[in-house]
Image (spheres, rainbow, N blue to C red):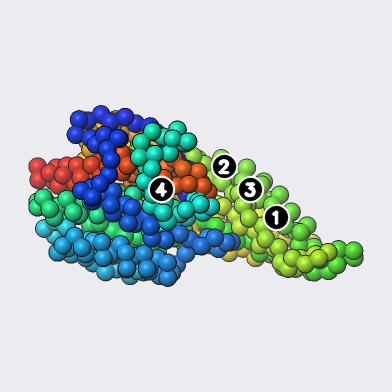
């Protein structure tokens, strides 16, 4: 899944019940213990040109089936629903009434050059300007803080015998291919359709109510190879690729005029060009250009691809050009008139963080899948402060704050349904 680094908010506690940032974790702090355990288990997408990872990749299968699932099982008698694509959900509540779903993801995609990615160390990184304990580990902000909060929520409900007049679903999602396939498999296998789906993701404690969609468009150019000392008169792949990129720039200027008041504009941006073969003094025979085609609500991916196909037709001289659809994620948008469904989450944020903020996510994410099925879907979670390639860490105070928000959201959600 494509991600964009979030703006970090440093928010001070506003409720007396909130844990102090200086609180030192110990054996009686199961939330932190779970977080450290998860941080020590690899879950990263392998480095290389292929940034996609299958849901049943051995790394994810081990992480889900031999680490995360047993941790939920260890909490006691839980109703665990096995789902396709190496996924599962935990069902809590009486099984009837309204349905709230919380979703956490497993593939770790960033902080790829972290020196000790699976250490799970707790320390105060004063060299980074942070004066409170943090947990270090690759994926700690993208995935593992949220999984630990789901474990904390299930433990709290079981231990405190919290009555839930409705259905709470805690979902583990393995989407790492920039599609909605894993979410669709989950939603197809759940016993109920959620009335609200909160995707846990590092949003800086904002509630993300929308994002543009994206389709990767793959432009392939076939031409004539030859030695650079005597280049062919036609079929030069590099020349054709340059012509394609120029034409895509002209098309980009057109599609950017299509905009949404909150989500922004559509776009056509080539972001990867690969030539084959790469040999000494040799003109390549093929080029592959990958285009980021951003979509808005109402955009038709097929029509967007047809636009690109028409724009590049006849580019270059003596080359064959084909255009096909790659991975696709749909746009998501929860309009203001439907945002009253967020009142339980907003009340909880107000208690533990501050005044709620609705924001738009700059990249594409999985919210478009459930949204396209009519499910109100938003994103919420801890801030992300680490470098995109370097260290990944999360403040313990932020994880406790998120856990508190989720507990209160569950309480408010099912209490409101009883009125």
Q: Nearer the viewer, mark 4 or mark 2?
A: 4
In the rendered image, residue 189, in percent from the top left (x then y), is placed at 27, 67
- Earlier sequence position, callout 3 versus callout 2: 3
72 sits left or right of 251 in the view: left
What residue is drawn where x is 38% and y is 69%? 61
Q: CA distance from mark 1 to mark 4?
A: 44 Å
Question: Splitting the image into 4 quarters, where does residue 87 fall?
Answer: bottom left
- Earlier sequence position, callout 1 versus callout 2: 1
Q: Are marks 4 and 2 in contact (CB under 8 Å)?
A: no
Say which element carries label 2.
loop
Q: Mark 3: give few (<14), some (14-19) or many (20+) Cα within 10 Å.
A: some
Q: Is residue 275 positioned above or below 121 on the image? A: below
Q: Are marks 3 and 2 in contact (CB under 8 Å)?
A: no
Q: CA distance from mark 4 to mark 2?
A: 40 Å
Q: Nearer the viewer, mark 3 or mark 1?
A: 1
Which residue is disc 4 drawn over? 136
Q: CA distance from mark 3 to mark 1?
A: 11 Å
116 sits left or right of 35 in the view: right
Between 182 and 10, the residue placed more toward the observer is 10
- Earlier sequence position, callout 3 versus callout 4: 4
Say which element carries label 1.
helix
**Mark number displayed over residue 251:** 3
In the rendered image, residue 269, in percent from the top left (x then y), is placed at 60, 49
**Mark number displayed over residue 244:** 1
The quadrant of the rendering that contains the C terminus is top left
Q: CA distance from mark 3 to mark 2?
A: 9 Å
What residue is drawn where x is 61% and y is 52%? 271
- Earlier sequence position, callout 4 versus callout 2: 4
- Earlier sequence position, callout 3 versus callout 1: 1
Which residue is disc 2 drawn over? 256
Q: Mark 2: give few (<14), some (14-19) or many (20+) Cα within 10 Å.
A: some
């Amino acid at each position: 899944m494509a991600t964009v680094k979030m703006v970090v908010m440093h928010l001070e506690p506003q409720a007396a019940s909130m844990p102090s940032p200086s609180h030192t974790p110990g054996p009686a702090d199961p939330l932190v213990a779970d977080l450290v355990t998860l941080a020590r288990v690899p879950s990263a997408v392998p480095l290389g040109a292929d940034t996609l990872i299958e849901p049943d990749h051995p790394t994810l299968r081990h992480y889900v089936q031999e680490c995360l699932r047993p941790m939920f099982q260890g909490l006691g008698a839980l109703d665990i629903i096995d789902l396709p694509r190496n996924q599962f959900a935990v069902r809590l509540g009486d099984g009837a009434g309204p349905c709230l779903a919380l979703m956490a993801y497993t593939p770790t995609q960033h902080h790829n050059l972290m020196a000790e990615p699976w250490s799970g160390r707790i320390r105060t990184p004063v060299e980074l300007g942070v004066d409170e304990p943090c947990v270090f580990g690759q994926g700690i902000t993208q995935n593992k803080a949220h999984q630990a909060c789901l474990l904390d929520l299930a433990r709290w409900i079981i231990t405190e015998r919290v009555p839930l007049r409705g259905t709470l679903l805690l979902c583990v999602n393995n989407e790492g291919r920039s599609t909605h396939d894993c979410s669709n498999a989950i939603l197809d296998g759940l016993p109920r359709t959620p009335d609200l789906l909160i995707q846990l993701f590092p949003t800086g404690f904002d509630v993300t109510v929308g994002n543009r969609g994206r389709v990767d468009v793959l432009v392939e150019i076939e031409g004539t190879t030859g030695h650079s000392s005597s280049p062919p008169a036609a079929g030069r792949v590099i020349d054709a690729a340059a012509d394609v990129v120029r034409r895509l720039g002209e098309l980009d200027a057109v599609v950017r005029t299509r905009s949404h008041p909150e989500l922004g504009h559509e776009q056509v941006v080539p972001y990867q060009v690969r030539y084959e073969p790469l040999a000494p003094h040799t003109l390549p025979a093929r080029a592959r250009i990958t285009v980021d085609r951003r979509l808005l609500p109402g955009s038709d991916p097929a029509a967007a691809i047809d636009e690109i196909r028409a724009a590049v037709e006849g580019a270059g001289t003596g080359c064959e050009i084909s255009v096909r659809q790659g991975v696709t994620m749909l746009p998501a948008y929860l309009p203001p008139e439907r945002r009253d469904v967020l009142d339980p989450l907003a009340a909880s944020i107000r208690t533990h963080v501050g005044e709620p903020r609705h924001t738009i996510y700059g990249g594409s994410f999985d919210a478009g899948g459930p949204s396209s099925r009519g499910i109100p879907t938003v994103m919420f979670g801890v801030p992300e402060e680490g470098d995109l390639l370097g260290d990944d860490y999360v403040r313990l105070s932020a994880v406790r704050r998120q856990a508190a928000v989720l507990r209160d959201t569950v309480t408010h959600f099912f209490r409101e349904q009883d009125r």
